[in-house]
Amino acid sequence: MENRFNRVRSVKDMVISLVILVAGVAFIMVPDSVPVNILGYTLAITGLILFFVMKTAYKDAETGEKLKKTEKYFPASKSEAILKALSTDPQDIDLESEDKGNGLKVDTYYSTKTGHVYTQLFEYIPYKYEPCSPVYSYDISKAGKLIG
């Protein structure tokens, strides 16, 4: 699933980094004391680094649409129930057991603009989460429980 969904910059990422960069440049331009100039250089460098590093959106390699991501963690004992719910109806997932273990991870990629939701279950194998289900595709109205 990680090959299909690549991290990209969102508009929010670019705006945040540019605001910090512009604030830094403004502090540098102000003819004031040395501490203000140091703050300006620090903000400007931070803004530049964030511009090149911060990527919070995901892009589907097949369709090209931009998506957001949520992750939910479950105990490993819930594997069968979660697999069954994902293959039939994602609204049947029992969220009461969420965050009571980290043996399983459900990654959900979604777009509120297009209404598409993609979900996959991962199992923790030492040092890494490995996929243990195919990528399921749903309409956003059917998978609202996974997004919230």
Image (cartoon, helix red, strand yellow):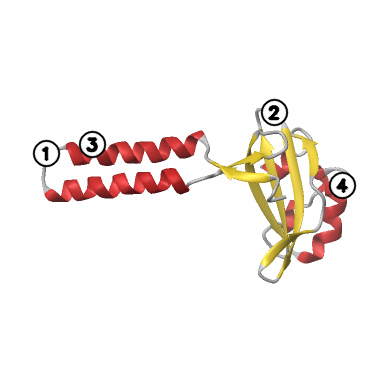
Q: Is residue 39 left or right of residue 58?
A: left
Q: Amino acid at mark 3?
A: Ala
- Quickly name the residue at label 1: 31
- Quickly name the residue at label 4: 87
- Quickly name the residue at label 3: 26
- Measured as percent of width and height from the top left, residue 41 is found at 25, 47
Q: Residue at x 25, y 39 (%)?
A: 25
- Measured as percent of width and height from the top left, residue 8 is found at 56, 42
- Measured as percent of width and height from the top left, residue 142 is found at 79, 36
**Mark 3 crowd level (few <14, some 14–19, many ≥20, 10 Å Cα):** some
Mark sitting earlier along the chain (3/2): 3
Q: Quadrant of residue 124?
A: bottom right
Marks 3 and 4, Cα distance to the nearest angstrom? 54 Å
Residue 114's disc is: 2
Mark sitting earlier along the chain (2/4): 4
Q: Which tag is nearer the camera, tag 3 or tag 4?
A: 3
